Amino acid sequence: MPPLKDRRIYFLKRHETLDVPYLAQTEFPEFITVGEERFFQMCPFAGFAFNGKRIGMLSDPDDKAIYDPEYTRNKKRCIGKAKIIYLATLIDSTYFHAIRGSQSPYVIRILCGWSIEKIWLNTRTWVLLVDGKSFEERISSEAELDEVCMLGSFFGANIEGIALLWKRYRNHRLKEYHSHSIETGDSLVNKRALRSGLSPVDEAQSKRIRENDYVADEVQNVISDLGWRHRDD
């Protein structure tokens, strides 16, 4: 096995059908990887599942839920010396059912109702967060964000981990909002300029002189003692 700092855990959407190196396959299932050490730190439930299997708490003799190359007789050649998690099977496993008492009944009910597609969608998003990669554009609403948080809770993520997810998503949406506001403002100025035959800069300057009105200009507003200026004051 490689050093712990270099190990990656593989999440597979479905079970592989061929036991040959995945690079030689044309129909290998979709997968995503994450640093093992980092993942087990943020998501201790996954580590508990591997430990539980070693001591017999998780019955998974055919490695359908999780695969650990160090503790199995079923050596896989498709990925080599790396742990594998088949999350859809793990959620439906005897181990998962046994630990239901420590999980929120609401979260349990929601996760058990997810399709394989939804499990995979949210798994990829959560893994990207844990691995320190960009995930924000994969979430289009707070309802979807809640689902990813539920998955993080299932993995055993603490409050700090869930808060990190919310913070990065909210910051991303805030940047999107400001970017859209700026683009909208620029578009309006350009449209007025096209109608008048002036350049956008000349149009804005003309508006100030002509109407003595407020114009969206950060520098102008910062240095002005008048603040929000209104016509006819």
Image (cartoon, rainbow, N blue to C red):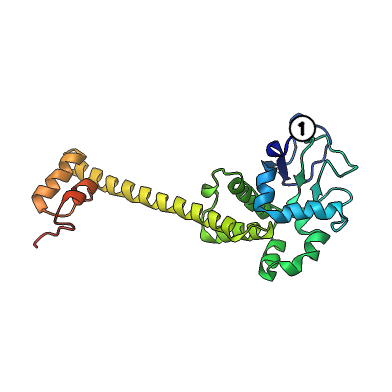
Image quadrant in which the N terminus is located: top right
In the displayed structure, 198 sits above or below 66; it is above
Residue for point 79% across, 45% down: 15
Image spot of residue 99 (x, y percent): 77, 64
Residue for point 63% across, 51% down: 121
Query: Would you identify the image quadrant in which residue 94 lies?
Result: bottom right
Question: What amino acid type should be assigned to the residue bearing mark 1?
Answer: Gln
Image spot of residue 81 (x, y percent): 79, 36
Image spot of residue 21 (x, y percent): 79, 32
Number of callouts in the render? Answer: 1
Residue linked to disc 1? 25
In front here: 214 or 45? 45
Looking at the image, can residue 224 be seen?
yes
**Apparent side of residue 144 relative to residue 11 in the rendered image (left or right):** left
Image spot of residue 75 (x, y percent): 87, 38
In the displayed structure, 150 sits above or below 34; it is below
Structural crowding at the residue carrying mark 1, measured as other residues with C-alpha within 10 Å and reported as few (<14), some (14–19) or many (≥20)? some
Residue for point 55% across, 47% down: 135
Image quadrant in which the C terminus is located: bottom left
Residue for point 63% across, 61% down: 150
In the displayed structure, 98 sits above or below 182; it is below
Mark 1 element type = loop
Query: Would you identify the image quadrant in which residue 195 lies?
Result: top left
Looking at the image, can residue 196 be seen?
no
Judged from this view, the residue extending furthest toward the top is 24
